[in-house]
Amino acid sequence: MPAGSEPPRPGAAPLPSLPHTWRPMGVRYAVVGFGSMLFIVCAAAWFGFDDSVRERFDVLQRLTVLAMGAALVACGWALGRARVTAEMEALVVVNGFHTRHLAWEQVLAIHLPEGAPWATLDLADGTTISVMALQGSDGRRARDGVRQLRALIDRQAPAV
């Protein structure tokens, strides 16, 4: 990253101090809230059954329910761990259980179009990757994060 001696462009987002991490807010609240409610409802239903009903569930059926619960927990964990971290030498994007370390030279731009579920990064090799940490449903928080990342990306661009 170049030295901080250059003045920021007028109207540009302020640069965050590095390292800086952005995380989605709404999806994390939804995972914790709905997951907790689902667990409470299922536990209440199970303990609300009398013994004769509970005895009709065999071991395989109980294991199936536990496996489905574990799969839901894994999905919630994957959604909740989404983040993007700007470091001095790289941009680290975590989407679900996949982590990408991108050198600043690889990242050309970031976009969050109106109505898009999350931001996308344009890479130097012509591909794009999703940035699930900046969710469109987070509104201003996501737009501010995109502006800050855009300012960091622009700062990395070579002067022509």
Image (cartoon, rainbow, N blue to C red):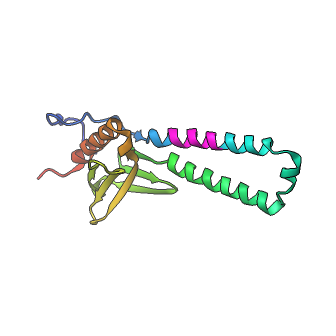
Residue 55 shown left or right of residue 33 in the figure: right
Q: Above or below — where is 155 with respect to 61?
A: above
- In the displayed structure, 120 sits above or below 143; it is below
Residue 154, image x and y in percent? 22, 46
Instruction: Report x, y in % for residue 83.
Output: 44, 46
Q: In this view, does 22 lie to the left or right of 68?
A: left
| Residue shown at 67% from the left, 53% from the top | 69
| Residue 23 painted magenta | no
- Location of residue 151 (image quadrant): top left
Q: Was residue 36 drawn as part of the magenta stretch in this picture?
A: yes
x and y, in percent, of residue 127 in the image: 30, 64
Looking at the rendered image, the quarter that the N terminus falls into is top left
**Image location (x, y in percent) of residue 130:** 37, 56
- Say which residue appears at 30% left-offset and 40% top-offset: 143
Q: Is 24 or 60 nearer to us in this picture? A: 60
* Magenta: main secondary structure: helix
Q: Is residue 55 left or right of residue 91?
A: right
Total numbered badges shown on the rendered structure = 0
Residue at figure coordinates x 26%, y 62% from the top left: 124
Q: Is residue 144 visible?
A: yes
Asked whether residue 87 is in view, the answer is no
Question: What range of the chain is rendered magenta?
Answer: 29-38
Q: Which of 23 and 21 is in front in this view?
A: 23
